[in-house]
Amino acid sequence: MENAFDVGDRLKKLRISAGLSQRQLAVSADVPHGQISMIETNRSSPSVASLRKILGGMNMSMAEFFEPEAVSPGQVFFGPEDLTDLSSALPTDVGQLTLKQIGDARAHGLQILKERYEPGADTGETMLSHPAHEGGIVINGEVEVTVGTQSRILRAGDSYLFNSQHPHRFRNLSDKPAEVISACTPPYL
């Protein structure tokens, strides 16, 4: 059986290799100093938004954090086994969320994800917000998408497109898994 990804240990190693103290990273990421310590010692699991904010303090994407080996820059075609799992250890507030990325998003300035939301999966009560634009289409199941004050349950065939600077949240309120294919530019994770 494969060992679970240790978010705290990985964060600590990257912070140290960047020559940053916990306090320096906290200031750079604009998060409380104690939050870095709690994550590094695995006493707290960061939300998607919190981890992204912390990694931004080191100018690192979530793809680089979870999958440090770079994808071949000339690779054009990808099988399911070639997708980068950005979520193997990514905590969510409720349920299980899987995010798999096609290729090297930074090199292309475009992030394409295959997202799977198990029943109860939620990107978190703290809504996401980042400088980008994103869109997607629900392939299976249903997902509640909230953007600013607008909220709608999207079913297979429904889609969305919005400015990612507007606070947003995704969650599966149903009892069946949901799948979404999405794109974001510039890459967020």
Image (cartoon, rainbow, N blue to C red):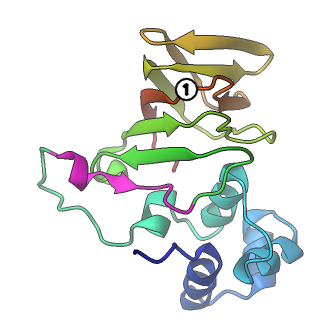
Note whether 155 is above or below 73 in the view shown: above
Can you identify the residue that label 1 sits on? 176
Question: Is residue 79 part of the magenta span, yes or no?
Answer: yes
Q: Which residues are magenta?
A: 78-89
Q: Quadrant of residue 53?
A: bottom right
Q: Quadrant of residue 21?
A: bottom right
Which class describes the residues within 10 Å of circle 1: few (<14), some (14-19), or many (20+)? few
Residue 62 placed where, x, y %? Answer: 51, 59
140 to the left or right of 58: left
Q: Residue at x 65, y 56 (%)?
A: 91
Q: Residue at x 61, y 78 (%)?
A: 11
Note whether 63 is above or below 184 in the view shown: below
Q: Residue at x 23, y 54 (%)?
A: 82
SS state under label 1: loop
Callout 1 amino acid = Lys
Residue 148 placed where, x, y %? Answer: 76, 21
Note whether 41 is above or below 110 in the view shown: below
Question: Is residue 153 part of the magenta span, yes or no?
Answer: no
Q: Residue at x 43, y 20 (%)?
A: 140
Residue 150 placed where, x, y %? Answer: 75, 12
100 to the left or right of 143: left
